[in-house]
Amino acid sequence: MSKQGSAGPVAQELLAGWLAARSIARGLPLPVPDHGGLRVDTGSVDEVRRHVFAGPAPEIRALALSITAPRVFIKMCGHGKQLLDLVPAGWELQPGGYLMTHDGGDDARLALPAGYRLELVTEGSTSVARVFAANGELAASGYAAEYDGTLVFDRIITEDAHQRRGLGRAVMAALGSTQCSDAARRLLVATDAGRALYSTLGWTVVSPFSTVVMR
């Protein structure tokens, strides 16, 4: 598979697993079927809800035509042009991402640079890893949630002042160590910058991941 990933549809089961575990990691309702895809009622200030599709589908156009309120996002596994071609005028393409997967493996804790410490807390199905600098400042963090055979990594962030010190790798390793089922599939959606890091850690692009919202 190329680094850019396939432009074809992703298995619905794979997408549903990622979206469900992501919702748990963020304290959101589980996804429900809607218009041939999946809907999550996010209910935040920036996003009322999101509709997610495993690939290009004619139902996307009907859905887009039915949406009149702002802050409703349509997301799809596939290239941005494929998604834009399915929605009417007035919808705007957002920065793209990549659905990625990992086979698992060695999650031994990585040594941190001097002056940093890592905290890992697991409550129920969700784990949070945080790296703190010597002055108590949060330097890096990330979340993971395991649900129904899927382990999702989410919101992996290294603050600008602490980048290029291996903190992101340490967070990923710590979160990976929380996996309960040996058979769980590891998934995440990465930005362009994130994809570069995750690729060095053995993650593989499954598909581009595109988003549109009404202007």
Image (spheres, rainbow, N blue to C red):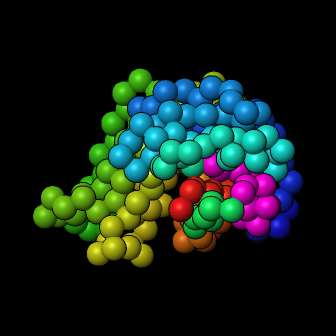
Residue at screen point 36% across, 54% down: 141
Q: Is residue 77 left or right of residue 163?
A: right
Q: Quadrant of the N terminus?
A: bottom right
Count every numbered label the image shows and give the total: 0
Residue at screen point 41% across, 32% down: 27
Residue 39 shows in this picture: yes
x and y, in percent, of residue 160 in the image? 33, 73
Q: Is residue 152 left or right of residue 164?
A: right
Please tell me in which quadrant of the rendered image residue 150 appears.
top right
Q: Nearer the viewer, residue 142 or 132?
A: 142
x and y, in percent, of residue 51 in the image? 63, 41
Q: Is residue 136 left or right of residue 101?
A: left
x and y, in percent, of residue 23 in the image? 51, 34
Chain part drawn in magenta:
74-88
Residue at screen point 32% across, 50% down: 130
Please tell me in which quadrant of the rendered image residue 5 appears.
bottom right
* Residue 54 highlighted magenta (yes or no): no
x and y, in percent, of residue 107 in the image? 54, 48
Q: Is residue 76 above or below residue 19?
A: below
Q: Is residue 177 above or below residue 188?
A: above
Residue 53 shows in this picture: no
Residue at screen point 50% across, 33% down: 41
